[in-house]
Image (tube, helix red, strand yellow):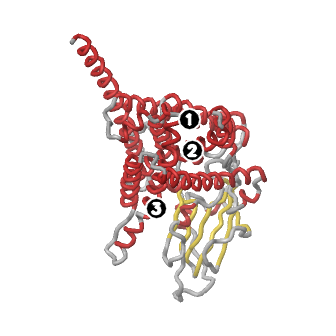
């Protein structure tokens, strides 16, 4: 277990900053308080009062044995202490309590479990194949972006590609990303707030540009090599959102998305049943942990995550499909491109803590679902499937209305339910209207 990126965003550098970690029961597990730069209120080495921290952690200080400290605090301190004992929830699990104080005030407190690892320890023990697998992801991203830039430039010079559709798509991505950034921010009356607000749109602008390049690079070749994959997609970009084919493909995509999510969960459950190493599958198939947790902060953060997931659900398939097209153009055969793409995708970015064989098998099954959705139904279905899978992974789901995060569950269910209802209604009503129009034309 490494330190969460949330501890460094923002980094604990300003005096008075406080970082607190709680377990699911609301008990203190980690506390960091940045001490002041200048403080002479109390002499160095003053005996601190640890009772408040132990009370917040729901631990009995009298039942713990003092031991020598082993874990260094990430901030300055003039006194350290440590205790050893048993976990109150499970007496068979040993725990350590590491603490530090500055001038009599606790500034560091952490509960250490047997599975807790120092930062970087897991990466240092990672085998060479896993390190190569992780490096492959960066290489693939660079290859896709570089190739997309060259191909898009060539298509623009030759007058190829749907520039109007690419512009609409990029504009939509920028709008969604900007709204997500604005909702996520916290605003105070200060002179630099305007500059910070403008800077928050830099990343959405980059994403919009990347989508524009990716789409201009892949659209002409996708239209020529696999034209069946963009039939409903072209209609959607033209603004025909009520088209029965578009609605039907969106509806099918929801089913594929649920299947992908169930595959993800079954992988983790099966690994646990067989005793294989498996990290949290949500953290692998869903968004980064800091993005997922941001949706739990408040409702603005949750709505912001909806927009972020919508953007990710489009840019990820575009890059993946472009990589598939690059293999197809290089190998000249569909089956060779599909096999190569599946192998490369399955062995790329296998994270530490996962059983590589089980994860590769699971990744191959997920790739198969992705390919079926793409070649049988098209890009609209892939987008809807990835969006559904990401949403189900990014937000906690609970059937308990009394749970404090039940509103996040409702947010996801309302969004997916509305898409499903509209898709079913437009697909059925549109199909009936077409049949009636055809019957009327025949009778006339």
Question: Mark 1 touching mark 2, by CB under 8 A?
Answer: yes
Q: Earlier in the sequence, mark 2 or mark 3?
A: 3
Q: Which residue is mark 2?
A: 320
Rendering coords of residue 188 (x, y %): 34, 71
**182 versus 280 height, above or below:** below
Q: Which residue is mark 1?
A: 370
Residue 115 left/right relative to 195: right
Residue 414 quadrant: top left
Task: Check residue 35 in the rendering and tell me which mark sits there, or answer none.
Answer: none
Q: Earlier in the sequence, mark 1 or mark 2?
A: 2
**282 versus 175 height, above or below:** above
Q: Please name which of the two marks, 2 or 3, marks the residue nearer to the observer.
A: 2
Mark 3 surroundings within 10 Å by alpha-carbon count, few (fewer than 14), some (14 through 19), many (20 or more) = some
Q: CA distance from mark 1 to mark 2?
A: 10 Å
The quarter of the image holding the N terminus is: bottom right
Q: Which residue is mark 3?
A: 203
Q: Secondary structure at mark 2?
A: helix
**61 versus 86 height, above or below:** below
Instruction: Identify which residue is drawn at 71% across, 34% down.
Output: 274
The residue closer to the viewer here, 361 or 250, is 250
Q: Secondary structure at mark 1?
A: helix
């Amino acid at each position: 277990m490494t330190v969460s990126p949330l501890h460094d965003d923002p980094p604990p550098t300003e005096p008075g900053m406080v970082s607190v970690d709680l377990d699911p029961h609301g008990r203190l597990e980690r506390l960091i308080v940045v001490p002041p730069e200048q403080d002479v209120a109390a002499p160095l080495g003053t005996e601190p009062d640890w009772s408040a921290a132990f009370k917040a952690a729901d631990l009995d200080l009298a039942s713990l044995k003092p031991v020598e400290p082993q874990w260094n605090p990430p901030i300055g301190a003039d006194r350290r202490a440590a205790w050893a004992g048993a976990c109150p929830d499970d007496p068979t699990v040993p725990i350590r309590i590491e603490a530090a104080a500055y001038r009599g005030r606790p500034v560091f407190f952490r509960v250490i479990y047997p599975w807790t690892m120092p930062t970087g320890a897991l990466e240092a023990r990672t085998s060479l194949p896993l390190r190569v697998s992780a490096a492959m992801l960066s290489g693939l991203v660079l290859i896709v972006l570089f190739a997309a830039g060259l191909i898009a430039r060539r298509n623009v010079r030759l007058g190829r590609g749907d520039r109007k559709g690419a512009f609409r798509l990029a504009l939509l991505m920028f709008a969604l990303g900007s709204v997500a950034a604005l909702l996520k921010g916290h605003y105070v009356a200060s002179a630099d707030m305007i500059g910070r607000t403008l800077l928050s749109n830099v990343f959405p602008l980059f994403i919009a540009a990347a989508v524009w390049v990716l789409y201009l690079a892949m659209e002409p070749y996708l239209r020529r090599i696999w034209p069946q994959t963009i039939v409903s997609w072209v209609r959607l970009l033209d603004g025909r959102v009520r088209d029965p084919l578009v609605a039907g493909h969106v509806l099918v995509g929801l089913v594929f998305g649920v299947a992908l999510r169930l595959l993800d969960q079954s992988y983790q459950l099966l690994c646990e049943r067989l005793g294989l190493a498996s990290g949290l599958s949500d953290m692998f198939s869903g968004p980064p942990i800091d993005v997922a947790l941001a949706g739990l902060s408040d409702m603005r953060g949750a709505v912001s995550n909806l927009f972020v997931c919508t953007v990710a659900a489009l840019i990820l398939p575009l890059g993946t499909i472009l990589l598939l097209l690059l293999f197809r153009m290089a190998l000249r055969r569909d089956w060779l491109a599909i096999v190569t793409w599946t192998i490369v995708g399955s062995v790329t970015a296998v994270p530490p803590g996962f059983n590589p064989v089980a994860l590769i098998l699971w990744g191959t099954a997920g790739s198969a679902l992705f390919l079926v959705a793409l070649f049988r139904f098209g890009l609209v279905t892939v987008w809807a499937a990835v969006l559904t899978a990401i949403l189900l992974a990014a937000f906690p789901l609970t059937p308990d209305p009394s749970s404090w995060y039940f509103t996040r569950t409702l947010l996801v269910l309302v969004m997916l339910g509305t898409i499903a209802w509209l898709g079913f209604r437009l697909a059925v009503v549109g199909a009936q209207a077409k049949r009636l129009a055809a019957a009327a034309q025949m009778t006339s």
